[in-house]
Amino acid sequence: MDPLVAGLLVEIAREHPSGVPTRAGVLAALSRHCHANLQFYLALRDTAEARREVKRLVGQYCTADDLAGLLGKVSLSVVAEEQKFPVGRYPQSLFIHDRAAMDAFVADAMPAPEGEAPRRPLAAARFFCVGSCFATNVAGHLSSLGARIHTTVLAESINSPRNNVDLFHYLETGERRGLLLRDDIRELAALDEVRAAFLASDTLVLTLGCAYSLVSGATGEPISRIEPGARFDGPRVATVAGQLARIVDACEARGFRDVFMTVSPVPLAGTLAHGGNAFVSDAASKAILRAALEEVLATRRVRYIPSFEVFRQGALHAHFPVMGLEDGNSRHVNTAIVGSVVRRFVDLHYVVDAPAA
């Protein structure tokens, strides 16, 4: 049976849970399948073979005139045809039902980069991993593989590109500005330790968490915790791209060999924008970060780790939770998937157990 037509049987079964089809129900299922599967509609409209197959399956419930009338009522206008890409296709049959299937999906989602330099011994790299709580998950798996790594976790309220620019300016120069001048942060001894670790590193892994900065409603300046009148700023993609470029500048000024960036799949904890709709704010925030990062990838020597795509796309097809599996918290990532991502990242860019240079 043609797979396009086979899907019709699923729609008919949904329309008739009792298992006894009716003419009206079959026509409703046909109409719904035409809208849900464009290829089915085109085949039914343009090929006698598809119409014969449909008649063979449901001819006792609808006539040729019924089919002709249905196609007229569906009223779909199709401009051009879908391309059949020889490579780079989104898989049309993707069922991630166990760990092995997830590992295979991660491998497909993280293809080998083109034109990259030879892989470097993992033991030779000195990683500086900074960003959202997702950064700790990445760092933990890197460490388990033998990497030398320092991890700096930034609270969501301050982990924005706007604030990260000021952080990296301090890491590069020792000069504090912006959020780092606030009394509740200025005296943090940990900042000196973070700077020392940055200066001793040669590889950045930056996890971008939130596009928005928490700012004072009165002054528009960044703040570290919610206060009366606080709000989210509204950065544009071009602004964020410029901020990310300045972070790259700081790393290059200190002789970093590699700069990797990724977007955290962890949703926002909450929002002061979009009428309090955290779902809309999260989508907008991640979209701004990902679009800005694409601009930087096109112009600077930065490499991308598609962990965001692995989790968000994988969630569409996995038969188990990609978030909250271990503890039921919807913002906690499935650590096994992080492990798959990190192992694939290391396989693509490094040699494990090779001697350091």
Image (cartoon, rainbow, N blue to C red):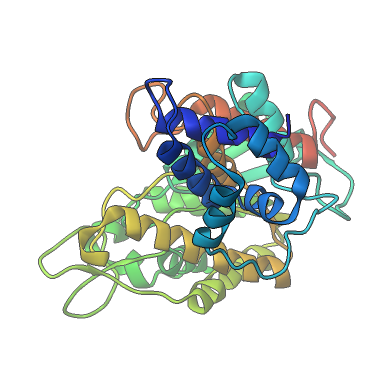
* Foreground pick, 60 / 282: 60
* Foreground pick, 180 / 212: 212
Q: In which quadrant of the rendered image does the N terminus lie?
A: top right
State how many labels appear. 0
Residue 145 in sight here: no
Query: In the picture provided, is 142 more to the left or to the right than 190?
Result: right
Give above or below for 98 relative to 262: above
Q: Residue 93 at what x, y percent from top left?
A: 67, 34
Query: In the picture provided, is 235 more to the left or to the right than 298?
Result: left
Q: In which quadrant of the rendered image does the C terminus lie?
A: top right
Q: Residue 69 at what x, y percent from top left?
A: 53, 56
Residue 340 in sight here: yes
Q: Residue 246 at what x, y percent from top left?
A: 57, 72
* Foreground pick, 210 / 88: 88
Q: Quadrant of residue 340?
A: top right
* Residue drawn 25% across the image and 78% down it: 220
Q: Residue 38 at what x, y percent from top left?
A: 62, 53
Give above or below for 37 relative to 163: above
| The furthest residue to the left | 228
* Foreground pick, 267 / 314: 314
* Residue drawn 64% across the image and 44% down it: 127
* Residue drawn 70% across the image and 36% down it: 53
Q: Quadrant of residue 345?
A: top right
